[in-house]
Image (tube, helix red, strand yellow):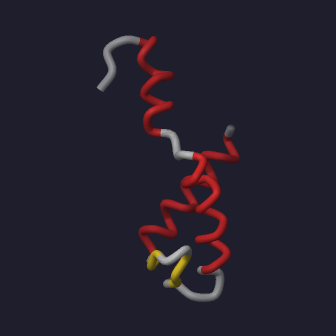
Amino acid sequence: MIIHLQQIAPVHAAYAPTEGEIAWAPAVIDATQTTGVAQVRGMMVDPPVIQRAREILEWKADK
């Protein structure tokens, strides 16, 4: 919760995806184009992880 308008930018920065997450998201989407579950960079990805990757890509597109 923020109580002042000057807190908006720092809060957005704190919750923004990292550069690593931004680089990871396309790999997840590419790996899961034909299946709902895959392994990307040694990590099992399933629908909730795929959704997070989509959200990261949408966030990036808005920037």
Residue at image coords 63%, 79%: 31
Q: How many marks?
A: 0
Asked if residue 17 lies left or right of residue 26, the reply is: left
Residue at image coords 57%, 53%: 20
Q: In this view, does 32 lie above or below 19?
A: below
Q: The N terminus is located in which quarter?
A: top left
Residue at image coords 59%, 71%: 28
Residue at image coords 37%, 11%: 4
Q: Which of 34 and 14 is in front in this view?
A: 14
Q: Nearer the viewer, residue 33 or 39?
A: 39
Q: In this view, does 8 lie above or below 55?
A: above
Residue extending furthest toward the front: 42
Q: Position of residue 55 (x, y in %)?
A: 54, 55
Q: Position of residue 62 (x, y in %)?
A: 67, 41
Asked if residue 28 lies left or right of residue 61, the reply is: left
Q: In this view, does 16 lie above or below 50?
A: above
Q: Nearer the viewer, residue 50 or 43?
A: 43
Residue extending furthest toward the bottom: 35
Name which quarter of the figure residue 44 lies in.
bottom left
Q: The C terminus is located in which quarter?
A: top right
Q: Where is residue 38 in the image (x, y as percent from the top left)?
A: 52, 84
Name which quarter of the figure residue 30 lies in.
bottom right
Q: Where is residue 12 in the image (x, y as percent from the top left)?
A: 48, 31
